[in-house]
Image: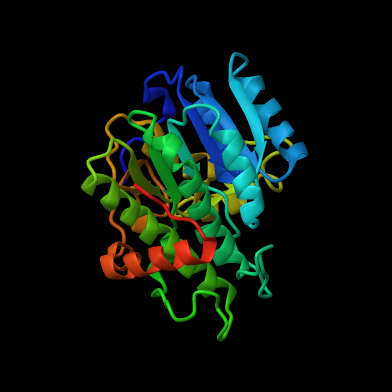
Amino acid sequence: MTTALWTPARLPLLTGKRIVITGGNAGLGYWAAEFLARRGASVVIAARNEQKATSAIASILSRAPRGDVSWVKLDLASLESVEAAAAELSSAPIDALVANAGVLGASKRGFTADGFELMFGTNVLGHFALTARLMPTLLATPGSRVVSLGSIAHEFNEMDLTDVMSDRNYSSFRTYSRSKLGVMLLAFELDRRLRKAGLQTSSLVAQPGFALDGLGAARPGITNGKRSSTLVRAALRPFAQGKDAGSLPTVRATADPAAQGGEYWGPDGWRQLKGSPTVVQAKNRSRDIHTASALWNMAETMTGLTLAV
C-alpha cells in the first residue's frame, strides 16, 4: 500500500542553490528541472540540443516566471564535449549534479565518439567523466550532492566485467540493464569513498519506477507523444505513473534535507513501479564493493580521468 503522494511543495525554498541536470530538456530530467526551478533553484540544463533546451526553459519559466534556468551544451557520448561542458559548469558552485541523461535502448549496437559501446559509454562513462571533472567544484560547495539515475532494470542482469562493451551476444535490454547497474555501482562506491574521506559531498541514486509520458501532465513540445486514452490510462494506472511522478524520487534525493548519502530513492508501491518517493531497497549486486572497485578502475582507464575524492 502506498502512502499519500509526496509533492515538491514540501521542499524548503532552494533560492541560491545551483543544480545541474543532464538531459533536463525532456522526460524525467525535464520534470526534475521544472519542480526544482519552481522551488527557487537555479537550474542548468546540460543537454545536446539547444533548440530542445530552449523550449524546455521556456516551458519552465512559464510556470516559474522568476526562475533562473540556463543551458550548457553537453553530449555525454563525447569525452571532448564532457570536458568543454565541465569547464563551463565549473564557473560557479554546484550544489547538486543530477546525472539523469542516458540512452534507453538501441536495436543495433552503436558507439560513442570515442569508440565505446553507446549505452555503456554514455550512461556509465559519460557521467563518470563529467563527475570526475566537476568533483573539485562539488567538493568546494558545502553539502553538495551527486544524484544518479538508476533503474529497476538493474534487477535483471549481473554485471559482466569481461564484456562491458557487449561484444558478445548484444541485447538491447541486457546492455541497458548492465549500464544502469554500472551507474549504481559507481554511485554507491562514490559515496563510500566520500564518507571514508570525511567529505561533505554525498552520492545518492534515484529510480523512477515504471514512468510513461502518456500518463503524466501535458507539456506541449516537451513530453513525447500524446496523453494516453482514458482506457489505456485505466489499464496502466495500477502499475505505472507519469514521468512527472517518476521524477519525484530524483527531486527528493536532490533537495530533501533528510536525504542521506548512499540512499536509493524510488516509488513506494508494488515492486517500486509507482507511488510516493521514499528510500527503497536495491539489489545487493548494486552495492558489491569488489565489482564496484574493479569497474571504477576500468572507468578511470577508459576515460583517462581520475575521480579523486
Name the residue furthest bottom: 168
Q: Nearer the viewer, residue 99 or 3?
A: 99
Image height check: is 253 above or below 263?
A: above
9 w.r.t. 281: above or below: above
Horizontal side of residue 225 vs 166, given as left or right: right
User: Can residue 282 be seen at all in this image of the molecule?
Assistant: yes
- Is residue 248 among what the camera can see? no
* 88 and 184: which is toward the camera: 88
Residue in view at x 53 percent, y 61 percent: 303
Q: Residue at x 48, y 45 (%)?
A: 246
Return the x and y of residue 306 as percentages of the image width and height. 44, 55
Q: Is residue 280 left or right of residue 186?
A: left
Rendering coords of residue 165 (x, y %): 55, 75
* In this picture, residue 161 sits left or right of residue 168: left
Q: Position of residue 111 (x, y in %)?
A: 67, 69
Give the quadrant of residue 73.
top right
Image height of 270 relative to 118, above or below: above
Which is nearer the eye, 296 or 283?
296
Going 42% across and 76% down the picture, which residue do you hit? 161
The colour style of the image is: rainbow
